[in-house]
Image (cartoon, grey):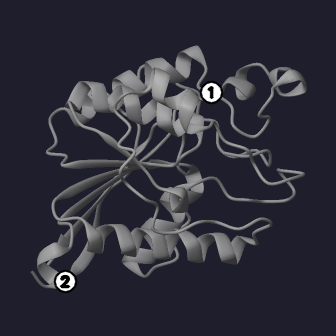
Amino acid sequence: MNKKELMSSTLYLARHGNRLDFVYPEWFNTAPRKYDPPLSEDGKIQAQQLAQRLIKEKIDYIVSSPFLRAIQTAHIVAENLDLTIKLEAGLGEWHNQDWMSYPPEIHPREELEEIYPRIDWNYSSLLTPIYPESEIEMLTRMKKTGELLVNNFQGNLLLIGHSMTILGITNGLLRENRAIKASVCSLTKIVNREGHWQLELETETSFLSEFDIKLSDGGGE
């Protein structure tokens, strides 16, 4: 099978739901993993609404950032679509030293296995971020991760990550420099037509009945 046959035909990109530390900033003060917050309660509702929106789409694979808020969002979607989740480090949060005073510690496998059975632990990440990471390095990482994923999976992919995930991968595949601002649980759709990626849907949120249009505020996203 050649590279063209392997390339995905449709790519969906979604940002995770609202973060607990966006709702309760004091959470950060006592958290054991300060840079890996879970979803807030409204974030879980948003993830359910995203899942309902995606039921009418044909999704073959779900690939998620390994940060907990993305995993939780992906797991809710995966439960509704009856799919597994592959964790890809290359989709992870921007390792911005202005947001993080040290490399982010994420939840270990032994904790995740107990709660999120749809994670496919046979999958190995295609790319690993570094710390610290400049904006250019982060966008280059996202672009490269997007290219690797669409060339390694045949079918329709759903990627769940962060606002910078959507920005970097969308602009990377379209070869553009669009000012994309992805709010929580927004949905973007890019379609491959004869080897050329075209934007069909940009950061849709019409399916969300309850959400906070909170973008990255300089403290992670």
Residue shown at the point (48%, 57%) measured from the top left: 166
Question: In the picture provided, is 182 more to the left or to the right than 103?
Answer: left
Disc 1 secondary structure class: loop
Q: Quadrant of the N terminus?
A: bottom left
Of pointers 1 and 2, the one earlier in the residue sequence = 2
| Mark 1–mark 2 distance (CA, rounded to whole Å) | 37 Å
Q: Can you see residue 184?
A: no
Q: Amino acid at mark 2?
A: Lys
| Residue 29: % across, % down | 90, 25
Residue shown at the point (77%, 34%) measured from the top left: 33
Does residue 214 sit above or below 46 in this rendering?
below
Q: Nearer the viewer, residue 35 or 181?
A: 35
The quadrant holding residue 209 is top left
Disc 1 packing (10 Å; few <14; some 14–19; many ≥20): many
Residue under label 1, please give it.
38
Residue shown at the point (52%, 76%) measured from the top left: 177
Residue under label 2, please give it.
3
Q: Can you see residue 175?
A: yes
Question: In the picture provided, is 161 more to the left or to the right than 147?
Answer: right
Disc 2 secondary structure class: helix
The quadrant holding residue 189 is bottom left
| Residue contact at pointers 1 and 2, CB within 8 angstroms | no
The quadrant holding residue 131 is bottom right
Question: In the picture provided, is 47 more to the left or to the right than 137?
Answer: left
Does residue 212 sit above or below 87 in this rendering?
above
